[in-house]
Image (cartoon, grey):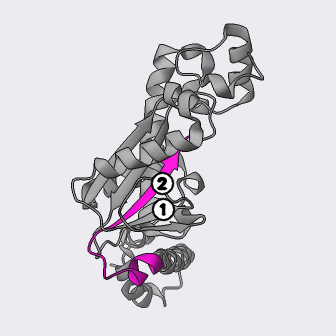
Amino acid sequence: MAETIKAIQARIQAAQPDMLPALFLEYGQDERAGVRAAVEQGKKRLAAYEREVARSEALWRYEREYAAYAHICGIDEVGRGPLAGPVVAGAVILPKDCDILYINDSKKLSEKKREELYEVIMERAVAVGLGYSTPERIDEINILQATYEAMRQAISQLAVQPDLLLNDAVTIPQVQIRQVPIVKGDAKSISIGAASIVAKVTRDRLMVRYDEVYPEYGFASNKGYGAEAHIAALKKYGPCPIHRRTFITHFC
């Protein structure tokens, strides 16, 4: 009995990318419309996968350039612009044989994809460090200096000491480890992209918890950024303890 269209479709849909070419050969001569459609869909999926492999491979450019360093650490921050909440820095050392796909600037990823990648990065990284600067600290020393503090804290939290830092655009003061600042590094370096994702997911989860404490401001959805509803709530209720006083002078 011939294999059913539904069964073939299920096989192609469930197949890992490296198994698809063999399935294309097996079913490529099948004249049934449903099978042809499944094969075409599989070819599109394989092409998208191959594009992602090539893109991810290109993200290793800086890690390959500095391959002589044993532990290369990517550094990035999230939350410099919001009106409320901390700035969070991530520091990630990936293994040199790491093959995680879809890492990118966290802003270019969906929340679902960031969450998925966060779990993979946390499981497979050699070391991950996180640093925080509170709204009070931001007001005290300004956002740039507070960001540097968070980055230094993230480095200090690593279980493995890095010997090279790849930073998203900045050079961090008071750090003795060699640094390589890369403009838009979270989209150019696999390590910085991983740090971006870890920092973003960590901060977003924190702002969701703050939303339970201060529900008026919509922190779960706006994450402390200046959304219209957030600004309206700020004008109506005034600031809460996690607002950055130096950021809200136009509204309060």
Judging by the rendered image, the residue that carries numbered circle 2 is 76
Q: Residue placed at 78% from the left, 23% from the top?
A: 250
Magenta residue check for 76: yes
Provide the residue designation for mark 1. 167
Q: Are marks 2 and 1 in contact (CB under 8 Å)?
A: yes
Q: Which region is colored magenta?
A: 60-79
Q: Position of residue 188 (x, y in %)?
A: 54, 70
In the structure shown, which secondary structural element does the residue marked by tag 2 occupy?
Answer: strand
Q: Is residue 28 above or below residue 242?
A: below
Number of residues whose C-alpha sits closer than 10 Å to that of mark 1, classed few (under 14), some (14–19) or many (20 or more): many
Amino acid at dot 2 = Asp
**Which labelled disc corresponds to residue 95?**
none
Residue at (51%, 21%) from the top-left corner? 211
- The type of residue carrying mark 1 is Asn
* Relative image position of residue 60 (x, y in whole percent): 43, 77
- Residue lying at the far top in this picture: please name it: 237
